[in-house]
């Protein structure tokens, strides 16, 4: 359990398979009075039935559902990949969300998926930990996560139904994050969609609150971080496999977005991973 002044996270996790999952109201601490909600963040295009209502979720969207009964039952069809958070929120938080346009039982676009991805990792690690320092990190991560999700509904991101070519744009965005190493030229994308560059920039920004160019860069940064964590490849190889045109450009963008050089990131990650490995050699979760 992670608690801030107005929000209590009582459960969180990931669902990566089809079928039925039940979410029962988890008792919170006596100080955590408020309304119970289930928040789902979708990683791919999927259909989710919650109790008796169907929701068609695009990649990089989220959905907030109140617990009107003691439990919620989700059923996914086809491929499924979503994260869930069970929250107890006080009325002040809920009112703030409403004033920003975040409606319950409606899907909203995640404006900064890469940032949300990193915050989620911190939150999940803190939730599973028992140390005071991890819990403190979890409190900040929870607050930041809620701020980032509200950013998708504060007027900077137009609702999906109002954006032309929204299905094509979400499909494009999913392909970018899935295949960051490909050559993503804006003019080629515009030619494929049959629209002009200015119009493409306008509707992409309206749909996601960021530009296509920034999404390409962030997807490549995420790819390079995975390679730095899991391989011994030289920086030049990591740069090339992540889709960057030159090593210099890769290192400049990496330091700008991550706050350190690729070499420093790999060293710190390895030191942290080694610290989580007990004497028997088995890495802790």
Image: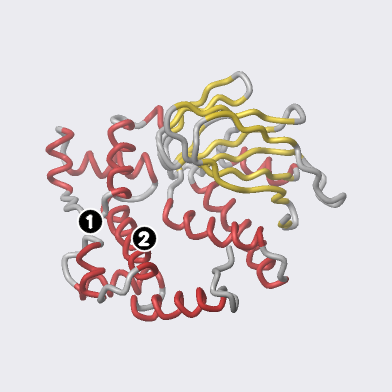
Q: Of all residues shown, which one is farthest toward the front?
A: 280
Question: Vertical placement of 73 versus 198: above or below?
Answer: above
Question: Which of the 4 image quadrants contains residue 202?
Answer: top left
Between 238 and 118, the one lying in front of the other is 238
Q: Which residue is mark 2?
A: 222
Tell me the quarter of the image containing the N terminus.
bottom right
For the point 71% across and 70% down, which residue is it? 131
Seen in the image, is 59 located left or right of residue 203? right
List x then y, in percent, for residue 283.
54, 69
List x then y, in percent, for residue 46.
44, 31
For the point 26% across and 54% down, which residue is it? 180
Between 258 and 43, the one lying in front of the other is 43
For the point 57% across and 42% down, which residue is it? 100
**Image disc number at residue 202:** none
List x then y, in percent, for residue 198.
20, 43
Please tell me which of labels 1 and 2 falls first in the chain: 1
For mark 1, give the secondary structure. loop
For the point 53% across and 59% down, which residue is it? 121
Q: Which residue is mark 1?
A: 181
Question: Vertical placement of 29 versus 23: above or below?
Answer: below
Query: Is the residue marked by circle 1 packed among few (<14), some (14-19), or many (20+) residues within 10 Å?
Result: many
Question: Vertical placement of 201 versus 221: above or below?
Answer: above
Question: Vertical placement of 148 versus 239: above or below?
Answer: above
For mark 2, give the secondary structure. helix
Question: Which of the 4 image quadrants contains residue 103?
Answer: top right
Query: Is the residue marked by circle 2 packed among few (<14), some (14-19), or many (20+) residues within 10 Å?
Result: some
Seen in the image, is 34 located left or right of residue 246? right
Instruction: Measure the C-alpha gap from mark 1 to mark 2.
Output: 11 Å
Question: Which of the 4 image quadrants contains residue 22?
Answer: top right
Tell me the quarter of the image containing the C terminus.
bottom right
């Amino acid at each position: 359990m992670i608690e801030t002044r107005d929000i209590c996270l009582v459960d969180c996790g990931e669902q990566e398979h089809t079928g039925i999952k039940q979410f029962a109201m988890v008792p919170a601490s006596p100080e955590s009075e408020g309304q119970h909600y289930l928040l789902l963040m979708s990683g791919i295009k999927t259909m989710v039935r919650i109790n008796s209502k169907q929701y068609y979720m695009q990649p990089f969207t989220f959905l907030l559902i109140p617990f009107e009964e003691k439990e919620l039952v989700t059923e996914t069809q086809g491929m499924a990949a979503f994260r869930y958070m069970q929250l107890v929120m006080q009325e002040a938080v809920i009112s703030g969300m409403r004033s920003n346009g975040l409606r319950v039982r409606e899907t909203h676009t995640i404006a900064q998926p890469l940032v949300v991805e990193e915050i989620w990792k911190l939150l999940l690690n803190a939730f599973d930990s028992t140390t005071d320092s991890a819990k403190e990190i979890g409190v900040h991560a929870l607050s930041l996560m809620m701020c980032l999700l509200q950013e998708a509904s504060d007027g900077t991101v137009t609702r999906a139904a109002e954006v032309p070519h929204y299905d094509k744009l979400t499909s494009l965005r999913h392909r970018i994050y899935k295949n960051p190493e490909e050559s993503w030229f804006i003019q080629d994308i515009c030619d494929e969609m049959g629209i002009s560059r200015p119009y493409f920039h306008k509707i992409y920004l309206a749909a996601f609150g960021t530009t296509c160019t920034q999404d390409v860069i962030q997807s490549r940064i995420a790819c390079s971080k995975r390679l730095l964590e899991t391989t011994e490849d030289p920086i030049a190889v990591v740069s090339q496999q992540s889709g960057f045109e030159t090593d210099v450009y890769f290192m400049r963008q990496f330091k700008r977005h991550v706050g350190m050089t690729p070499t420093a990131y790999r060293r710190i990650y390895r030191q942290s991973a080694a610290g989580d490995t007990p004497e028997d050699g088995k890495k802790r979760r």
